Amino acid sequence: MPIKVLITKNYDELSEKAAKIIADAIRNKPNLVLGLATGGTPVGCYRELVRMHKEKKLDFSRVVTFNLDEYIGLPPTHPQSYRYFMNENLFNHVNIRMENTHIPDGMTDDPQKTCEEFEKAIETAGGIDLQLLGIGANGHIAFNEPGSPFNSRTRVVEISEQTRKDNARFFQSIDEVPRQAISMGIGTIMEARKIVLLASGARKADAVAKSVKGPITEEVPASILQKHPNCTFILDEAAASKL
């Protein structure tokens, strides 16, 4: 199936469209299994979901969430950990049950076991109904860097220097950016029933174009989404400029 592309005027409209898709999915299935992403792009979407919860009574009480990834070596209280990010941007502001939120444990003593348990938890929940994604300037999804196998499962990954540089803006310096993460694999992501990818800004335009209409190659991890039966890219005009 070709990727469905929605082009919005700006970041705010992108965020509203994404939040509406998620809200509709929750209303249709109150116990939705929702895959979540971190990074700068989904922040507006989460802000809008919080608003819908407060003003329109959007109910998260039965929603189950799985996050794509977590840095290895950062405790949940670290301001740059993805657990902290999710709590600050979404979970603390809606009526979700914390035991229903799943983020890989970056402080685990047994990363392999943690990865296997994460996969098992997704399976036990019945699989992911809707997966939210961002995209890196090099085409990565989650921390699946170029060259990641399309059949990969949740695992420990090395973070590329490019991604570490991109993420350094969130830390005091690049030296503080972890070199490894636990990441959902591409094979795991592809099993979600519906995928919504968000991209904003001209920096993402090249990766978006290669993913939507380029050859399907492990060098552009997001290009595999062309094979997903229900995948939508929500872009602002800058991110769509090379399509």
Image: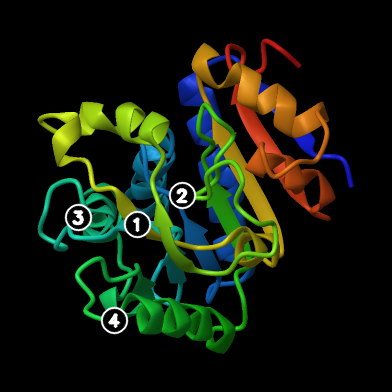
Residue placed under numbered mark 4 in the picture: 110
**Identity, as a three-letter code, of the amino acid under mark 1:** Ala
Please state which amino acid type lies under the numbered disc 4.
Asp
Q: Residues within 10 Å of mark 4 (few under 14, many from 20)?
A: few
Cβ atoms under marks 1 and 3 closer than 8 Å:
no
SS class, disc 2: loop
CA distance for labels 2 and 1: 7 Å
Q: Position of residue 163 (x, y in %)?
A: 39, 34
Circles 4, 3 touching at the beta carbon (< 8 Å): no
Disc 1 to disc 3, how far (Cα)? 15 Å
Query: Which one is closest to the eye, mark 2 or mark 4?
Result: 4
Q: Name the residue carrying label 1.
A: 181
| Residue drawn at point x = 34 percent, y = 40 percent | 47
Between label 1 and label 3, give the one nearer the viewer.
1
Q: Earlier in the sequence, mark 4 or mark 3?
A: 3
Q: Amino acid at mark 2?
A: Phe
Report how far apart the C-alphas of labels 1 and 4 lie in the structure: 13 Å
- For image coordinates 72% across by 23% down, the residue present is 209
| Colour basis | rainbow
- Compared across the picture, whether 142 is left or right of 241 comes to left
Q: Nearer the viewer, residue 239 or 70?
A: 70
Residue with the mark numbered 3: 84
Q: Secondary structure at mark 3?
A: helix
Closer to the chain start, of discs 1 and 4, is 4
Q: Is residue 3 visible?
A: yes
Residue 138 marker: none
Q: Nearer the viewer, residue 158 or 209?
A: 158
Mark 2 = which residue? 143
Say if 160 sits above or below 92 in the image. Answer: above
* Residue 60 position within the rendered picture, expressed as x and y whole percent measured from the top left: 41, 67
Left or right side of 217 for 34: left
